Each structure stands twice: as C-alpha cells, then as structure tokens.
Amino acid sequence: MSSELFYDKKPGFDKANKAAVMAYAEGYKAFLDEGKTERDATAAIVRRAEAAGYQPWKRGMDVRPGDKLYQINRDKGVILAHIGRTSLAEGVHLTAAHLDAPRIDIRTVPLYEQEGMAFFKTHYYGGIKKYQWTAIPLELRGVVCVCKDGKIERVPVHIGNKPEDPKFVITDLLIHLASDQMTKKATEVIKAENMNILLGSMPSENAEKDEKNKIKLAILEYLHQEYGMSEVDFLSAELTCVPAFNACDIGFDRSFVGAYGHDDRVCSYPAATALIDNADVPAHTNMCLLVDKEEIGSDGVTGMQSRAFDTFLSDLCRAQGVLPEECFEHSICLSADVCNAYDPNYAEVSEPRNDARVNCGLAIIKYTGARGKSGTSDASAELMARVRTILDGAGVVWQTGQLGRVDQGGGGTVAMYLANRNIDTVDAGVPVLSMHAPFEVIAKLDLYMAYQGFGAFYRAE
Ligand code: MN
Ligand code: MN
C-alpha cells in the first residue's frame, strides 16, 4: 500500500534498455565535439535535419501536414518545425533549448606582445569560476569577416580540434609563488584582466632589426597567410576559446559522459533528434527552438527575447490563415535546460528531497528563479499534470528538480520568455554535475530519458 502512496525518486535502470541508452550517447558525443560553439552546433543540427528531409523555410511557402521545415537565425540558432495534422490554431508542441555555453571570448583589439610572449585579451562569456579556465588546453573557434576593397569575406576559424593542431592556454601561477594568491577568495584568485591567452613567442624573420613587436608581427603574418586577415579584421570577428578536449565516457561502467558544454547541448540534442527521428505526421505541429545568448541573459537578435521565433511561427500561421495569437495561446512548451544534479560532495547546498538526481531521468522543474521565486514563470499545477500524464503514459523515467537550497543562489532559464508570450511553459532537462565548469558530467540514462520524454511530448495529442 505504502508503495502506491509514496513518491520517491528512483534510478531508472530497471525501466531502460541499456543497449539503447549506451548507443544514443555515442551520437551525442559526436555532436558535442562538432558543436562547441552556437554556430557550430547550429550547423551540426541542420546537417542532421536535412538528412531527415527538413527544408529551409521561405516566406510564402504552403504549410501542409507532414511538412518538415527549418529556419536558421543568423547562423547562431535554428527552429525546426514538423507540421501536424491539426490546424496551427490548436497550438504547437514546442521544445526550447540553448546552444551557447560559457567560454572565453576574444576581445575586439586583442593581440599584444609582452616580455617575449604574445597574448590575446579576453572577456569571459557567461557565469564561470574563472580559476577553472586556467591551465587547461583551449581551442580557437569562430569567424572573421575580412574586409578588403569594399568586399566582405567570411572566414571560419577552427584551430585546436584536430590531433595535429596546436592549442592555447591561460597560464596559472605556480604553487611555489602562490602564498598570497592562495589566501584570496575564489572570486579574486584569477582576475579577468589576467585571463590572457598564450599565443606564441617566436619573432618574425621579416622584421627590421630594432623593430618592436616582432612576435606580434609573426602572429599577424601567420593569420594573414592562413585567413587573409590583418589586425584590423579582429574588429569584425567573433573568436572564442573553448576547451580543447573531446567528450568521453566517465567511470568503470561508462555510465556518465564528461564533456565541455553539456549545458545546454544535453537538452538541445535530444530535443532536436526526438523531433527529427519522429517519422509519423504528429497530431499537433511540433517545433524545436534552439537559441543563443541564454548564458548572458537571452538578449539580442539570436537570444530567446528576440522576435525571430514569433516572426517564424506567425509566418507559418499566416500560411494557414490562422491568427498567430490563437496559436500561441494554445501552445505548450518544454523549456529544455539543464539543472543541477544532487552531488553528495556538496550536500550542504542541496535539498535532497527536491533536487534532481543522476540516473533518475528527465527532470521536470516547476519553477527556477532566486530570492523567493524571482525570475521564473512558475508552471501551473494543470500544466504539471498534463506533462506528468504524457511522460507516465510513455513509460519515461522522470523526476522533479530544483536549483538547490532556497537562498543558496538560484538562476533562470528561457522558460519565462516563452511563458511571457502566452505559451504554457515548464522546464524539463537533464541533471548535470559540475555545471558551467569546462568539463561537465551527465548520466547517459538521463540523456536517453530526455530523448524519450521529448519524443512522447511531440507525439502527444
Ligand atoms: Mn542552460
Ligand atoms: Mn547555463
């Protein structure tokens, strides 16, 4: 009797097909290594969608049941749509996740030489513990728009992801001279202005004898040869340093994946692949919205607060003669973002009844926020019931989650920006260990259950 009346979070091993769990993680690891920036992740998702028959949306196209459409937003995000049997007036089943992750961005005027070494100045992106980003191998990714004679050439940059490539690093202070540093608060151990990327030390052979900045010159010569760029082209570049290690299995039993950027590719990937893998024409139109800029507040044209999503969905509605407001009003959304996994090594910041646990499945989070639920859309009891019913009906292993102890910190997701559009929204995501560290950890079972859960949500009537 008690087993029927109690609610307990339980690991889902008895309900999961282990071979399917392990196999699905292989595809995910490949995606992680391809998609370490929002631009690369967008391209990786589009490749998979196109292979399944998705076509780029053009304004004025017909929108019929079974159509598979996508729209890229400035190369930094993408919306996938699988048109359903019912009219868009009945709403869409939407998942929304983000493709950006914390990283080290290169500044606009970055290159300098000092004491026999050349460096890039940086500005960190997103919430990081700065000390975690020193003394680890970094790779350089991004794009440079080279401007010459009134023409613009967009040149992609990838250095450090191939085995033969050089890598980059932010140096740390040796422990032998760190007696002052070690007494500082963690927020002050590494200063942002000292997070400079080591680039090289060999002087140019073409420099005049008493010319200054010979090392800087040698680096500019290399960049000019490889990318056709000059120093001024940094002004029209987006370059970033991300960890240079690839995704790998963790543990004797390989039950975890360790990688850079699980937040939020561990939700983006299952949200997108569950849509792409669903061959049947769904009852409601299914959409997967993958955005940028979540880690810095969701502002800007590629963030969740941009009108890009509204414009696309309104375009689809107009093609069916439907009032967009009616579509929004009847839509439901799973805001697919990660949450903290309960970590017994840091039990003091957790609350064991409510925090999500590894291997207990997809975590549904009614509210996020901080300081008394500030900054959350707080899903309704009715929506929680609807999502519960969908997940239980499909045999998905799932649990509830929250962001740690109340008043310990907190945070938000894109959920509120969707809910503010009059779309019923609740957070659903994979629990992560070491979230926002350069190397985060997730459980393969939770990843697979996210895939199963999003699939059930798309298929629901
Ligand atoms: Mn996130
Ligand atoms: Mn995050």
Image: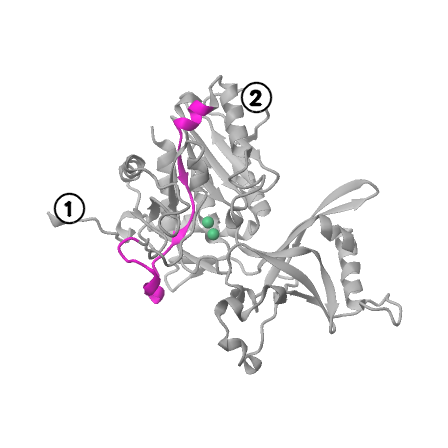
Residue 458 in picture, x, y percent from top left: 39, 33
What's the magenta region? 325-354
Which residue is nearer to you in this view: 274 or 292? 292
The residue carrying mark 2 is: 61
Calculate the distance from the C-alpha at mark 1 to the C-alpha at mark 2: 52 Å
* Residue 5 disc label: 1
Decide: few, some or many residues near mark 2? Use Cα within 10 Å; few <14, some 14-19, many ≥20.
few
Mark 1 or mark 2: which is in front?
1
Amino acid under disc 1: Leu
Q: Is residue 331 magenta?
A: yes
Task: Check the image and report above or below for 2 versus 181.
Answer: above
Residue at the spot 28% in from the left edge and 41% down from the top edge: 395
Relative to 213, does residue 56 appear above or below in the rendering? above
- Quarter of the figure that contains the C terminus: top left
Q: Seen in the image, is 4 located left or right of residue 13?
A: left
What residue lies at 43% left-to-right and 28% top-to-bottom? 328
Residue 417 colored in magenta in the image: no
Q: Is residue 11 left or right of residue 61?
A: left
The quadrant where residue 284 appears? top left
Q: Residue at x 53, y 64 (%)?
A: 130
Among numbered discs 1 and 2, the one appearing first in the sequence: 1
Residue 432 showing in the rendered view: yes
Scheme by which the image is coloured: one colour
Image mark for residue 72: none
Q: Secondary structure at mark 2?
A: loop
| Amino acid bearing label 2 | Met
Near-viewer residue (157 or 332): 332
Residue 363 location (% of width, % of height):
34, 48
Farthest residue toward the bottom?
A: 176
